[in-house]
Image: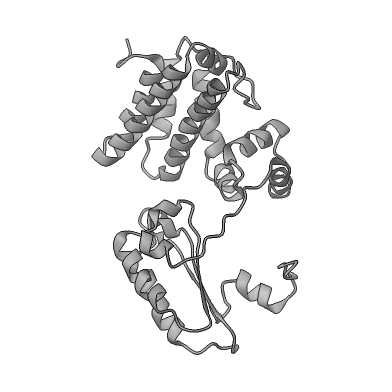
Amino acid sequence: IENMDVPADDPIFSKVAAFSHPDMMVVQRVFDEQKSRLKKSVEIESIRKISPFLRMTSSEGGWRVVLIDDANTMNRASQNALLKILEEPPKNTVIILITHVLGHLIPTIRSRCQVFDFNTLDGPSISTLLQRMDPSLTEASRDLLIEISDGSMGKTYRMHNEGGMEAMGSILSALETYPQMNWDYIYEIVDRYSFAGQDEAYQNFQYCFLWLMQKMINAKARASSDIGLSIENQGVNSFFLSKNLKNLLQIFDDCKQHFESADNAFIDRRQILLGLFFILNGKTSVN
């Protein structure tokens, strides 16, 4: 097959795009109405709906397709339920698992699947898609989004639509005066991302914070004096130049462990975020 494109006016294209094709089932994380966000995992109840679907006769006499998105979020019970289906799948069935972390799937599932790796999108491709999505974006903002996305259009979309760019802007602004820290502004940031219902914004803040640290580590490992950010920030450059690779690795590790231990212990997010800037400033409290 040289080309798998299906014209947009094809009836099958329309049905698949609308998730209404009778021979296709999409399993994904469900929306939590109480928390106003997607649940953290694909639940076992969703996996259990696959078997009854596959037992039905194909309405168009062809193949039946099951697509499981975010398959890496399934817990062990969900994966075991899926494994039973994979062990004896019905004829003319294709089960597609989309995963961003293959290692999160148990070995017995991986051994029954054929793995296809998809390359990340290049910068020009994401830039073209961003121009279509939001023509009002400045070139600098578009370039920064491309950097943060790491070749993933899905991540680009989330960063653009769920406060990712605002989070990165807050982090860069907080570091702009380094080595002097504007604690009044930092407290404003901490309060902003600590409110209830700010789960997506908080997650994006966490991602952007660690991404920036990794960006510095990669530049330092290449013995480069330039971080390579599309947006110039004197404070970030000063912080970067004042640290060696060992320092940056330790700071990154401390910040990552801070996030993880705080999540596990259900510590107030305000303390989590404030602690990050204490780590960057090399102190445990504000004078």
Q: What residue sits 50% from the left and 90% below the top? A: 57
Residue 240 x, y percent position in the rendering: 52, 16
Instruction: Compare residues 269 and 5 and report the one nearer the observer.
Output: 5
| Depicted 274 relative to depicted 72: above or below | above
Instruction: Compare residues 201 and 277 and report the one nearer the observer.
Output: 277
Determine whether, in the image, residue 170 is placed left or right of residue 138: left
Determine the image quadrant of residue 219: top right
Determine whether, in the image, residue 81 is placed left or right of residue 4: left
Determine whether, in the image, residue 171 is placed left or right of residue 264: right
| Depicted 179 relative to depicted 7: above or below | above
Instruction: Compare residues 51 and 85 and report the one nearer the observer.
Output: 85
Q: Residue furthest front?
A: 111
Residue 23 x, y percent position in the rendering: 55, 81
Identify the image quadrant of the C terminus: top left
Determine the image quadrant of residue 59: bottom right
Residue 44 x, y percent position in the rendering: 33, 67
Figure coloring: one colour
Q: Is residue 30 visible?
A: no
Q: What residue sits 43% from the left and 86% below the top? A: 55
Identify the image quadrant of the N terminus: bottom right
Residue 220 x, y percent position in the rendering: 54, 20
Q: Is residue 61 visible?
A: yes
Q: What residue sits 43% from the left and 18% below the top? A: 246
Instruction: Compare residues 240 and 162 and report the one nearer the observer.
Output: 240
Q: What residue sits 24% from the left and 38% below the top? A: 265
